[in-house]
Image: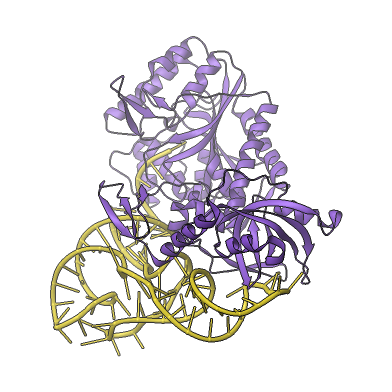
Chain colours: A purple, B yellow
RNA sequence: GAGGGUGUAGCUCAGCUGGUAGAGCAACGGCCUUUUAAGCCGUGGGUCCUGGGUUCGAGUCCCAGCACCCUCACCA
């Protein structure tokens, strides 16, 4: 928070302490404010109300061959480069579509407008009208007939100079400090066009997914973010407080239990694309809030869901990217073929040589320890299997793979396997070494579900903070009868990482979580 | 949580075994009406992340802290 105090400094409040201090202005900022004053003397305002642009940079360039020289256009955008030569200047204007060169000279715009132009800085938002021509070096350019300032920048933009050499864009002194880029994403987006492109792709991925699901007849719904009980995943929640009700509420860790209530209610196919919140560690694959797509379909099982995931990802890749092959961290991913399918125990056996199926807790413990896994004394069967899987199998699952038929201990909401006791009908999809999605034939037997949640409650009582809590209303819903149902959760952020070759989840989240800035 | 790395001008970075801070770009002033990393001449610009300590003297060495990055651990 700050308010302007003339030309000597700003009063700035520290967001953490509430302390207000006078922060002196850097010379660069003093110069900008001085320019603003000069502009105001001749121009009334430096912040316009509107501008009617008729064209966009890229369209002007693309349409040049057809429309020819001398075509009149009006454009608005941000001034991104400036080459002044006395009474004439070149620069580049960047708008929503791209960059185009502009040419401003006194005898075209008039002296008043040129005087104003001299006070502009890189980063200023302007509107121009003018006609299109090609310079003698062959660049399509708009020569300005009128020029107005739409918004003055008071802070210097990190200048990124670029040159086209052999059709390759060479960037000099890129704005690349990761901390600044994440904290001031608005600057990152202005200056680093590939960042902007990535988030456009993310948007297209989500809308292609939505279109695919709607075309299948599923409907999009919204369920509570603020929940009196949380469930649907193993995770610690964020806790908040409702003042009027004077009660604790949790930010959801998953949509699952509410969406299945809707299947009970008679919807045959529902999905939700929304934020979940998990109060856990952060790393390159985890942000405390992240976007999940969850889908539930009545009368189907996990076999149907595997086919659907394959079809959905393939269709989405074709529609958005026109390809099913993606380079991810120097390897090639292929979403065009059916995914590899392998059983959970089989995968562990293949990767580690340990045959864990049907073993007792003590047998599992010695198997794991023989393989060099360190275990908490309190580790249960689920923990040990999970540890073995994470250590030996998960890092090597690069090509799209479904791991299926998990031990029942790891999956309290999944239906028992129809053939093999001790397993549930569940699969997880792994791509690029990451867990991308998780699905099961949903447990719809209310008595079985109660027993499994009670087992979770027992774990909780022993100190497992991530074990699930018993949700009586959910059990009541199941007692009204839920059709056989297939359910899926798929991480949108991770999918975006894979399809845009992003190494960190922070690169696909516009405003990733950061510790507070210490100003 | 552990280990490693980074933090210097608006941006990108130099700065040796300790001697009071530098470059390129940007900015400011001057010249320049087809330039494009425009050019030429000139000028200014710093809480060297913060706080302690050692020292005659600290950007540099020591201690503590903060932020970010990487690896590992934890965590579905």
Q: Which image quadrant: the C terminus of chain A? A: bottom left
Q: Is residue A156 above or below residue A445?
A: below
Q: Quadrant of residue A159?
A: bottom right
Can you see residue A497?
A: yes
Residue A214 coordinates in the image, percent (x, y): 66, 27
Q: Is residue A319 above or below residue A254?
A: below
Image position of B13 (left or right of B47):
right
Q: Is residue A126 above or below residue A281?
A: below
Image position of B53 (left or right of A438):
left
Figure label count:
0
Residue A183 coordinates in the image, percent (x, y): 43, 52
Out of A180 and A477, give the one closest to the viewer. Answer: A180
Image position of A303 (left or right of B3):
right
Residue A511 coordinates in the image, percent (x, y): 47, 46
Out of A5 and A112, give the one closest to the viewer. Answer: A112
Which residue is found at the position 79% from the left and 62% from the top? A133
Can you see residue A400?
A: no
Residue A415 coordinates in the image, percent (x, y): 51, 23
Out of B3 and B20, give the one closest to the viewer. Answer: B20
Out of A234 and A112, give the one closest to the viewer. Answer: A112
Q: Quadrant of residue B48?
A: bottom left
Image position of A202 (left or right of A155):
right
Which residue is found at the position 52% from the left and 55% from the top? A152
Which residue is found at the position 58% from the left and 23% from the top? A270
């Amino acid at each position: 928070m700050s308010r302007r105090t003339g030309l000597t400094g700003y009063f700035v409040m520290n967001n953490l302490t509430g302390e207000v201090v006078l922060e002196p202005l850097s010379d660069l900022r003093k110069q900008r404010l001085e320019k603003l004053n000069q502009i105001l003397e001749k121009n009334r305002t430096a912040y316009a109300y509107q501008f009617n642009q008729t064209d966009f940079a890229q369209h002007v360039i693309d349409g040049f061959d057809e429309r020819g020289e001398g075509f009149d256009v009006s454009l608005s955008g941000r001034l991104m480069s400036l080459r002044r030569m006395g009474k004439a200047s070149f620069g580049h204007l960047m708008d929503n579509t791209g960059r185009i060169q502009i040419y401003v000279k006194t005898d075209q715009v008039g002296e008043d407008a040129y005087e104003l132009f001299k006070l502009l800085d890189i980063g200023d938002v302007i509107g121009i009208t003018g006609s299109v021509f090609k310079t003698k070096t062959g660049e399509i350019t708009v020569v300005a007939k009128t020029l107005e300032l739409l918004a003055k920048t008071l802070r210097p933009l990190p200048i990124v100079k670029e040159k086209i050499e052999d059709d390759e864009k060479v960037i000099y002194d890129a704005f690349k400090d990761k901390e600044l880029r994440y904290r001031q994403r608005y600057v990152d987006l202005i200056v680093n066009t590939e960042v902007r492109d990535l988030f456009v792709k993310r948007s297209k991925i989500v809308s292609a997914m939505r279109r695919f699901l709607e075309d299948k007849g599923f409907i999009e719904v919204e369920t509570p973010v603020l929940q009196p009980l949380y469930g649907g995943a193993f995770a610690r929640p964020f806790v908040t407080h409702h003042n009027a009700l004077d009660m604790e509420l949790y930010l959801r860790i998953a949509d699952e239990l509410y969406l299945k209530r809707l299947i009970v209610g008679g919807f045959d196919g529902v999905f939700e694309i929304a934020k979940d919140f998990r109060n856990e560690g952060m790393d390159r694959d985890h942000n405390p809030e992240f976007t999940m797509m969850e889908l539930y379909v009545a009368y189907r099982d996990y076999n149907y869901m595997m086919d659907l995931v394959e079809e959905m990802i393939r269709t989405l890749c074709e529609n958005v990217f026109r390809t099913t092959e993606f380079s991810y961290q120097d390897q090639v991913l292929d979403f065009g073929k059916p995914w590899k399918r392998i059983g959970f125990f089989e995968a562990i056996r293949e990767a580690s040589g340990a045959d864990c199926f049907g073993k007792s807790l003590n047998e599992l413990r010695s198997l794991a320890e023989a393989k060099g896994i360190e275990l908490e004394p309190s580790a249960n069967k689920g923990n040990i299997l999970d540890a073995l899987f994470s250590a030996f199998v998960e890092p090597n699952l690069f090509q799209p793979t479904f791991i299926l038929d998990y031990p029942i201990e790891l999956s309290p909401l999944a239906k028992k396997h129809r053939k093999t006791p001790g397993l549930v009908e569940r699969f997880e999809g792994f791509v690029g070494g990451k867990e991308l999605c998780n699905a099961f034939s949903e447990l719809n037997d209310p008595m079985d579900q109660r027993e499994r949640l009670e087992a979770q409650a027992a774990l909780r009582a022993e100190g497992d903070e991530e074990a699930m809590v018993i949700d009586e209303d959910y059990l009541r819903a199941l007692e009204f009868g839920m059709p056989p149902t297939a359910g899926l959760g798929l991480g949108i952020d991770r999918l975006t990482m894979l399809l845009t070759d992003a190494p960190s989840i922070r690169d696909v989240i516009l405003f990733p979580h950061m510790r507070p800035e210490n100003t």
